[in-house]
Structures are given as structure tokens and as C-alpha cells.
Image (cartoon, rainbow, N blue to C red):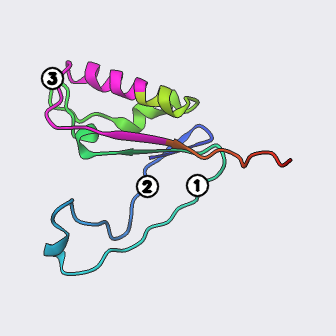
């Protein structure tokens, strides 16, 4: 997910790679996907354990919707909020492993 100027955008590749460990079954190579990553942008990388987590009614965790409330967070704060919210949403138990990494593009350091 890309967080830019208060907006949350899912990033999708036209030709996504197969799941880890299954690349040899596809027979083809990997494609490269690129996107703008401007100063101030925040990129949230996550595994399917995050988006496939379910509440008591079986509804998937709405990551993009939840991120809208935290678009001004620093990476560490965003991870803490998503983690706490995800555990609250699932009643404290995830059915799969979940991992997240948040990266913010900083401006270049000031010159001498």
C-alpha cells in the first residue's frame, strides 16, 4: 500500500510473481513493477496474513480502509497501530503468520 498526501493506494503489478517457493512451477521469469515513491510517501509492505485475517463473522481485515485513519503516522507508529487494530479485529488470534514493513521516503540531507 502506498500512503501519499492522505490517500491510500493499493499497488498492484500487472504480472505478479507466484507465491514464495512456487516460482519454478510458473516456467517464466519475473516481471518488474515500478511506481513513484516521492518524498514524504510511506510504503507499507505486508504478507497475506494481514489482509486475510478475519473477524468473528469471517470478514477479511479491511487494511486500506483502516490505513486512512493513520496516513500521518511515522512508520513505527503506523506499524504499532495496524498491529494493535489487527489483533483487536481478530479477537487476539491470527489464523496465519503476518509480517509488515513500513518505509518512508525522506528528503535528501541538507548540503554542507
Residue at x 59%, y 37% (from the top left corner): 6
Secondary structure category for the residue under label 1: loop
Where 112 falls versus 56 (above or below)? below
Would residue 51 be found to the left or right of residue 105 on screen?
left
**Residue named by callout 3:** 56
- Tell me which segment is drawn in magenta: 80-102
Where residue 81 sits in the image (x, y, percent)? 42, 24
Would residue 103 be found to the left or right of residue 100 on screen?
right
**Residue named by callout 1:** 37
The one nearer the camera, 1 or 99, is: 99
In the picture as drawn, the residue positioned furthest to the front comes out as 112
Q: What whole-number distance in Å separates the C-alpha atoms at marks 2 and 3?
A: 28 Å
The one nearer the camera, 91 or 22, is: 22
* Mark nearer the N terminus (2 vs 3): 2
Q: What whole-number distance in Å separates the C-alpha atoms at marks 2 and 1?
A: 11 Å
**Residue named by callout 2:** 11
* Mark nearer the N terminus (3 vs 1): 1
* Mark nearer the N terminus (2 vs 1): 2
Instruction: Tell me whether circle 3 and circle 1 mark residues in contact (CB < 8 Å).
Output: no
The one nearer the camera, 104 or 89, is: 104
Residue at x 34%, y 21% (from the top left corner): 84
Secondary structure category for the residue under label 2: loop
Q: What whole-number distance in Å separates the C-alpha atoms at marks 3 and 1?
A: 36 Å
In the picture as drawn, the residue positioned furthest to the right comes out as 112
Neighbours of disc 3 within 10 Å: few (<14), some (14-19), many (20+): few
Q: Which mark is residue 22?
A: none
* Pair 3/1: label in front: 1
Neighbours of disc 1 within 10 Å: few (<14), some (14-19), many (20+): some
Where 34 falls versus 83 (above or below)? below
Would residue 104 be found to the left or right of residue 29 on screen?
right
Amino acid at each position: 500500500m502506498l500512503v501519499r498526501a492522505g490517500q491510500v493506494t493499493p499497488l498492484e503489478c500487472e504480472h505478479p510473481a507466484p507465491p514464495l517457493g512456487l516460482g519454478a512451477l510458473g516456467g517464466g521469469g519475473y516481471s518488474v513493477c515500478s511506481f513513484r515513491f516521492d518524498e514524504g510517501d510511506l510504503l507499507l509492505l505486508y504478507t497475506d496474513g494481514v489482509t486475510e485475517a478475519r473477524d468473528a463473522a469471517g470478514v477479511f481485515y479491511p487494511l486500506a480502509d483502516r490505513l486512512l485513519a493513520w496516513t500521518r503516522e511515522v512508520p513505527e507508529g503506523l506499524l504499532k497501530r495496524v498491529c494493535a487494530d489487527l489483533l483487536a479485529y481478530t479477537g487476539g488470534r491470527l489464523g496465519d503468520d503476518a509480517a509488515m514493513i513500513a518505509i518512508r521516503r525522506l528528503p535528501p540531507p541538507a548540503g554542507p
